[in-house]
Structures are given as C-alpha cells and as structure tokens.
Image (cartoon, coloured by chain):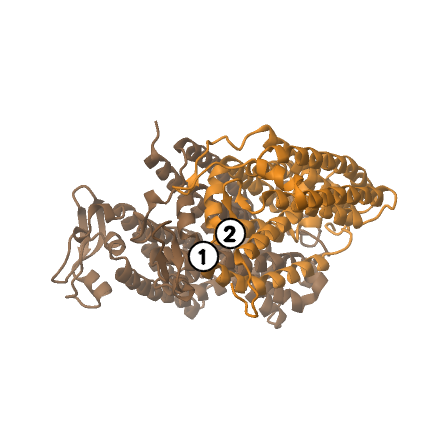
Chain colours: A orange, B brown
Amino acid sequence: MELGLGVNVDLTVVWAFLIAFAVFAYVVLDGFDLGLGMLFAVAPDRRDRDVMMNSVAPVWDGNETWLVLGGGGLLAAFPLAYALVLPALYAPIIAMLLALIFRGVAFEFRWRTERWRGVWDLAFIAGSGMASFAQGVALGALLQGIEVDMTTRSYAGGWFDWLTPFSIVTGIAVMAGYCLLGATWLVMKTEGDLQDRMRRLAWPFGLATLGFIGIVSLWTPFLQDGYYNRWFTGWGLVLAGLVGAAVLLVAWRMFTSLTVHRHEYRPFLQAIMLFALCFVGLGIAMWPYVVPVEVTIWDAAAPEKSQVFMLVGAAVLIPLILGYTAYAYWIFRGKIDPDAGYH
Amino acid sequence: MFDHADAVLLARIQFAFTVSFHFLFPAFSIGLASYLAVLNGLWLAGYGHVYRVLFDYWKKIFALVFAMGVVSGIVMSYQFGTNWSVFSDKAGPVIGAPMAYEVLSAFFLEAGFLGIMLFGRERVGNALHMVATAVVAIGTLLSAFWILSVNSWMHTPAGFTIDAVTGQFLPTNFWESIFNPSFPYRLAHTVTAAFLTTAFIVGGVGAWHLLRHTAGDNPGARRMFSMAMWMAAVVAPIQVFIGDLHGLNTLEHQPQKVMAMEGHYESHPEGWAPLYLFGIPNDEEQRLDYAVGVPGLSSLILGHSLSAPLAGLDTIPDDEQPPVAIVFWSFRVMVGLGLMMVAAGVWSLFCRWRGTLFTSRPLHLYAVAMGPSGLVAVLAGWVTTEVGRQPYTIWGLLRTADSAAPLDASAVGASLMAFVVVYFIVFGAGTFYVLRLMAKAPITGGPDDWETRAPIRTAGIAPGPAQGTPMDEREEAR
C-alpha cells in the first residue's frame, strides 16, 4: 500500500506481524493459566487450589480470546494458510479444543459441587496438560513442514504426519514452558507456603524449559535446509547468536531473581522474556513462510482490499483491547487473599 | 469403505452438532446479559433491592452459561478450518474480515469486562461496575451483529467477485457484503429470538418458585415473573411480525427454501396456494402426502393477496432442492412455539388485568412448560434456515459437497464421536448445575443477606443466606 511521500508498506508483512503478535499474546497469557492448571497436580490442598484458581478467574476468558483471534485472524489475513494448516494438524487441534472445553468449564463447575469437585479439578489438570501438549505438537508439526498440493490448494499429507519424535519433544517442551510461566505467575500472586513451593518448583521447570530450548534449537536447523541456512549463514548467524546469548542471560537473571533476590514479579516477567526470545528465534527460522516449507505469507495472503479493511479496525481496536485488558489486570492486581472466598 | 460423500456427511453432522450445542448458550446469554444490565441499572436507580437480589441470582447462572458458550465457541472458530477448509480458503477473503471484527470488537470486550462484572464490584465501585455490565451486554450484541452478517452472506452473498484462477471470493465492497440483503432481517429475528429465549427461561423459573408454596410470596420470583411476562406480551407479537418480514425476504432471495418450508411441491400459477398445516413430505414422489391445508392462506401470507401466484419445487431441478421434510417440520415447530409464546403473553395480560398474575396456577404451569420453548424455537429456526440453504454453503455458488476439507471419513467420524461424548458429559453436567441454581429461590431477606463480594472471588462460592454456609453444601446436605 502506498502511504504517500514515497513510503510503501507491505500489508502482508504487517498482517504477518499482527498474527504473530496475537499468537504470542495467547502463548504468554493462556500459557500461564494453562501452566497453573497443570500445577494443580502438585497442589492437592483445597485451599491452595482455590487461591490458584481465583488468581486467574477474572482474566482467563480474555486470555483465551487471543486464541480465537489467532484462528480468526489467520482465516481473515491468510485464508489459504488456515485451510492448509488445520486439516494437516487435525488430530492435535481437535484434542486441544476438547481439552480446552474440560479446563474451561472447570473454572465454573468446581464451585458448583462438593461431591464432584475432585472430578472437575482433575478435568482442569488433564485439560490444561492436554491442551498444552497439543499446542506444542502443533508447533512442532508446523515447523517440520506440511505437505501441500498447490494445484488443488489443499493439504496433501497423511493423517499422522504430525506425529514425529520432534513434535512430541516440542509438545513436552511447551508443557514445561507453560509450567514455568504458571509457577512464576503464582510467585507473583500468592504468599506464604504456597509461594515458597512455587518458587522452588520454578527451578526444575526453568531448567527443563532451558534444556528444551537447547534441544529444539539444535534440532530445528536439521529439519529443513532453509532453517539451517537462515540460522547459520550471514546475518542470520549473528541474529541467532544474539538471541541464543540473550536466552542464557535472561535465564540467569530469572534464576537469580527467583532465589537470590527472592523477587515477587520479576521471575514472571523474565519467563515471558524467555518466551519472547524463543518466538524471535522461530520467526527467524520460519520467515517468510506461513506454512513451511512451501507457502509464503504472500502466497497465502488475502487480497489487499481485505487487508486494508481489517487494518482500519485493528489499528483502532487492538490498542483499545490492550488498554482495557491491562486495566482489568490492574484492577485485580496484588496478592490473592486466601480468606476472601469464605465467610 | 468410506468415500468423500461419507466424509462430507459426517462433517455436516459434526458441524450441525457442535453449532447447535453452541448456539443454545449465546441464545440464552445474549438476552441474559441485557437483562442483568437492566436489573443492575434499576437497582442503582433506586427501584428497590429486589433488583439487586435478582442481579446476583442470575449473575451466577450467567457465569456458567457464558463459560460454556466460550468453550463451545472456540471449537467453532477452528472447525471452519479443520472440516471446511475449502470453504475457508475460498470465502476467507470476504467473511474472514467480519469474523476478525467479531473477535476484536465483541469477544475481547465481553471477556475483558466479564471479570469486572462478576468479581469487581467491590474493587471498582458501583458506577464502573454498571459500565462493565452494560459493556458485556453490548459485546454480546456486537458479536451477534458480526456473526449473523457472515451467516447472512452465505445465504445472500453480495459485494464480491470470483477469482478465475483460485476460485476465491474476492471482496469488491465490504459495505455490501456485510449489509447483504438478508442480514437486517436475520439480525432482527435472531436477536429478538434471543431476548424471548431469555424471557421465557426467566419466566419459567419465576413461575416455578411461585408454584412452590414455600416461596409463594418470594418478591424476587414475583418480580422476575412479571418482567418476563411483559416481555412475552410485547416482544412475542413483534417477533411474529419480524419473522413474517424475514420470510418474505427469503422468498425473494431463496425461493426454494420457502417452498420447502411451505411444503409446496406444486406450483400455483393462479394463486390460492394453500397453507399446509400438516402433511408428510415425500421427496420421491415430489408431493405432500396426507396434506391438510387452508386454501389461499399461503398466497395471502407470502403474496399478500389470495390470488398471488406461487411457484413450487416442480420449478426447481432435483439437485437444487433442500431436504424438504426437515425444513418443513422444523419450520412448523418454530412457528408453533412462537404462537404459543404469543398466547403466554396474552394470557399474562389477562391475568394481570384480573389481578391474578401471581396466583394463577394454570398460567404458572404453562410458563414453566414454556421455559425451554425459546431454546427449542431458536434451534428449529436455525435448522430451517440452514438446512433450507442446502445443497449450498454459499447460496447458488459453492456447494456443500465442494466445501469440505479433504478428510478421511474415519478421521471425521472419530472426532465426531469424541465431540458427542465430551459435549454430553460436560454440557450435561453444566445444565444440571444451571438447573440446580434455578431450583433455589432468590433470597428474600434485606441487604444484610446480600452476597457481599470479597475482592477476588470466583462466581461460585455464594455465601448462604443468614447462616453463611456455601449454598452447595446446604443443598447437598439436604
């Protein structure tokens, strides 16, 4: 699009960044509450569970809306990518949707029954775990490449192409990363014994996350020549090296703020930074493909008229959304009072 | 063993199943969100604390229903891609944008302010809480606006061209595609249906508590029953009028859908087309067996003249006809329930005039029986319009059989089974919890018995009246 004064903006690139942002917002925001769901498993005490759930009850719905934006935005901005990726990832996507149902309703159902509370707690744990795993598997399956028939504009692979050792590793990696986010969120939102336990738990999850980042980073370049070339030649090498160094630095700061400084909110922010760096690394590897390794963002882009029409709304609404979402978090800031829920 | 036709059929069953379940929740929560805003507003304006009692009562139910609507809705946003990828690829450039607008302008709005509405009164104060409550209600209506625009476009596509190479629908004018010919009618008809759905559920719950002697004088039950019956008396007749307009619009753009609704296999070039009240559609023989009809009435309704000519399905090629029996019957269910709603409204006006609104047991029994009528009518109407669009997903342009993802029937069948099992377990339990909340009468005491919300509290833990035991425990201890 010509903006005047000789400035040209490629709206396809703008939309690629917007969708990437939506996915990142989803991963971080729902990441911590999915992680919190898995951490229910190591917090059997009813009181602790009530506190944990109350810490996300007012915001989980908003967090999950970013997933809808990721899906809806992909359909709107890159309809071909949406039509290729979802059939290719059929089983993990369906598993994720079903898992999200169980953990979503658990937020309400567990307060509605004494007798069955344990069952909904279990649904919360299993649903959170399965959704996290399925998202990681989907990431891995996308990274390893999706077979496409461009003459029929359709997915051309088999129904279990997504299932590989690599995608299982990325599945577990995402579970570990979400647990780290969940544990550091709880360090920020809770006090006393529960906070101490989450502080201690953040260590193994942090180490596991770091280890998986290493494994996936070493594995990814060998999945496709394109990844290898982008990471290990020219500016890609410099950029990839910088990202790698930054990961180590941020991880170091996170562990010290967890244990040495015993900081309240910094570990959570540092865990988010770790995710952001991973995201940049993935972006460098995948660019400019939206469906590796055959379909670029320009191949899949919606026509300019659609891009412009949506951008007008997005330019106004996304800042507004960020504003009132931040406001909602601000209103519910501070530690959760364990006694607040009871009389 | 399976071929593409099986996969398409299974994908259709799956979509019908998941969207029908999903639709029940917003059909209820759209009206309920507005009702909550009205209740909270009346309380703040000083009309009495009964409105605050009702707000807290329905708020808990809203939280449950809304959560089920959210999780079943996420499924829908991905199912376009998993099961209908060809449709998504082709229609995405046109319908993607309004769907993205739905997320940006409605879903985030609802989600962002829902937390404040449910848990934030103590933190933000009554004024901002009122704003949040109103914003949630506006969000539900905006959501209806966008998604019904997309749905209407599939019935009456406008503002596009078709790319000769890719077969994609490309937008030429978004104003035309969003405000496509059937959209205003569908929006008015569906949102009004949502309000009626809520009114009859609220009325049914109110009547239930009026019938139970223990709560016979419950001011909350009386107030909610009275409000619901006003809605029935005023809105149900309006809905009949809107439905008629919507039907005429359908006749103009999708005549074979109306032929199926009416059971008109045969044409009536001379007018005097009968309105069939009953009959068994017979697609094989292309006639309505055992037909019972009122001569000329269909011409009168659709053509506004007894001698208005009406074409029948005999003018439509077989492979362009929707399945008549489903459309014919679902339409009759919807219209029948609509007329019974009007009857409830009229009856309530009569009792109100006689002063027996809160004592007439027959009226209360009828209202309880009509409690779920809105939900059934909404589904029946939905089936009428969507099955009536067959064999197309995009009317006249893209066939359903050409819209599905290249999936194996076994994959679609397996996911369908999983959805059926999970939905019945999860939403079955949810419905049980909703009914259990409804079975409790609204509290009757003064402000001391109100639910005072501690800062961060989830929707569930309601302090019981007076003795302060959580309601669940009291309920289960019985």
Crowding around mark 2 (Cα neighbors within 10 Å: few <14, some 14 to 19, many 20+) is many
Q: Residue furthest left?
A: B270
Q: Is residue A179 above or below residue B248?
A: above
Can residue B144 be seen by looking at this rendering?
A: no
Chain on which label 1 sits: A
Residue located at (75% from left, 50% from top): A269
- The x, y position of residue A250, in whole percent, is 78, 45
- The x, y position of residue B291, in whole percent, is 18, 49
Q: For numbered disc 2, what is the local secondary structure?
A: helix
Task: Choose between B261 and A297: the one closer to the eye.
Answer: A297
Q: Residue furthest bottom?
A: B45
* Of marks 1 and 2, the one in the foreground: 1
- The x, y position of residue A272, in whole percent, is 72, 47
Three-letter amino acid code of the residue under disc 1: Pro
Task: Choose between A322 and B341: the one closer to the eye.
Answer: A322
Q: For numbered disc 1, what is the local secondary structure?
A: loop
Residue located at (22% from left, 68% from top): B304
Q: Residue furthest top?
A: B1
- The x, y position of residue A71, in whole percent, is 52, 49
Q: Is residue A83 above or below residue B409?
A: below
The dot on residue A72 is 2
Three-letter amino acid code of the residue under disc 2: Gly
Task: Choose between A15 and A235: the one closer to the eye.
Answer: A235
Crowding around mark 1 (Cα neighbors within 10 Å: few <14, some 14 to 19, many 20+) is many
Q: Which residue is mark 1?
A: A303
Q: Is residue B284 left or right of residue B221?
A: left
Chain on which label 2 sits: A
What is the distance, in whole Å, between disc 1 and disc 2 at their CAs? Answer: 16 Å
